[in-house]
């Protein structure tokens, strides 16, 4: 596994729980608006064993861990890292994923308490946004269905990017979630330019106004609560 960095404590990555954040390096998507673009290359970060990462992450005054990236599930030894972190059963373990590797997600689920799944766009536009050789949506759908059938808390979210996305995309994502049987809170957060993005890639993207989504917020599918977090 390749490690980007470890943040000792975060109060914002898991609602209500202070966590140590582990950033894996490398991603199989290439979303143009990525806020951690330095972690996209598969040779980014540094090679570490699960034992080395767990030793570095443990011992902080937090109540759990958030494993993010990059994309953690591209690594076959992710379940082993989670197993090592789960030794302390009182610690909450959260995974951030885009859901494109359901096989590794399935192996990881016995050690997980919650999953943030980054629902990139409507199913029909997945390959366009992720910029992959093959359409990743079938694998993402498999991961979502797996999470819905589990006891792991499933938290879908989308980064809304001005000029790249429309309110109809958000409505379409909610409809897709509803068709799969999801009921609960769906988080939409705003894109904003940051030092972590690639300037040439984000030309033309804008930080959207929350008012753009008023129509989508007005009538979500039954059982879905849309939550807007504009930073």
Image (cartoon, helix red, strand yellow):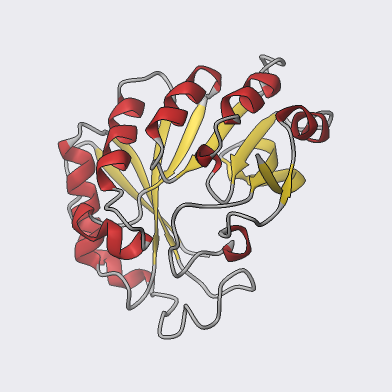
| Horizontal arrangement in the rendering, residue 47 relative to residue 124 (left or right) | right
Report whether 22 appears left or right of 98. right
Considering the image in quadrants, where does the N terminus appear?
Answer: top right
In this orientation, does residue 174 appear? Answer: yes
Q: Residue at x 35, y 55 (%)?
A: 120
Residue beneath the point at 45% across and 62% down: 30
Can residue 218 be seen in the rendering of this structure? no
Q: Quarter-wise, where is residue 94 in the image?
A: top right
Q: Above or below — where is 133 with respect to 151?
A: below
- Name the residue rendered at 47%, 34% in the picture: 115
Residue 43: image quadrant is: bottom right
Q: Which of 174 and 23 is in front in this view?
A: 23
Q: In which quarter of the image is residue 154?
A: top left
Q: Is residue 67 left or right of residue 27?
A: right
Between 151 and 126, the residue placed more toward the observer is 126
Question: Which percent across, then down, holds residue 149?
Answer: 30, 21
Residue 165 x/y as whole percent = 29, 69
Question: What's the residue at 19%, 45% (across, down)?
Answer: 176
Query: Where is residue 97 drawn, in percent x and y?
Result: 47, 42
98 over 194 or under it: above or below: above
| Vertical comparison of 18 with 85: above or below | below
Q: How many marks?
A: 0
* Viewer-closest of 146 and 158: 146
Q: Is residue 15 left or right of residue 211?
A: right
């Amino acid at each position: 596994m390749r490690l980007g960095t470890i943040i000792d404590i975060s109060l914002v990555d898991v609602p209500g729980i202070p966590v140590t954040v582990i950033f894996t390096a490398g991603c199989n998507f290439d979303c143009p608006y990525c806020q951690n673009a330095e972690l996209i290359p598969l040779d980014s970060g540094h090679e570490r064993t699960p034992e080395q990462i767990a030793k570095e992450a443990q011992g902080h005054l937090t109540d759990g861990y958030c494993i993010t990236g990059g994309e953690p599930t591209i690594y076959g030894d992710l379940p082993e890292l989670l197993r090592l972190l789960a030794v302390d059963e009182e610690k909450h373990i959260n995974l951030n994923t885009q859901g494109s590797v359901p096989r590794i997600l399935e192996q990881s689920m016995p050690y997980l308490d919650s999953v943030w799944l980054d629902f990139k766009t409507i199913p029909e536009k997945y390959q366009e946004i992720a910029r992959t050789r093959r359409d990743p949506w079938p694998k993402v759908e498999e991961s979502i269905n797996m999470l819905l059938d589990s006891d792991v808390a499933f938290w879908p979210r989308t980064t809304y990017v001005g000029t790249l996305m429309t309110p109809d995309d958000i409505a379409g994502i909610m409809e897709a979630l509803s068709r799969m049987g999801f009921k609960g809170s769906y988080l939409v957060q705003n894109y904003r330019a940051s030092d972590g993005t690639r300037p040439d890639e984000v030309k033309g993207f804008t930080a959207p106004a929350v008012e753009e989504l008023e129509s989508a917020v007005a009538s979500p599918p039954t059982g879905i609560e849309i939550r807007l977090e504009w930073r």
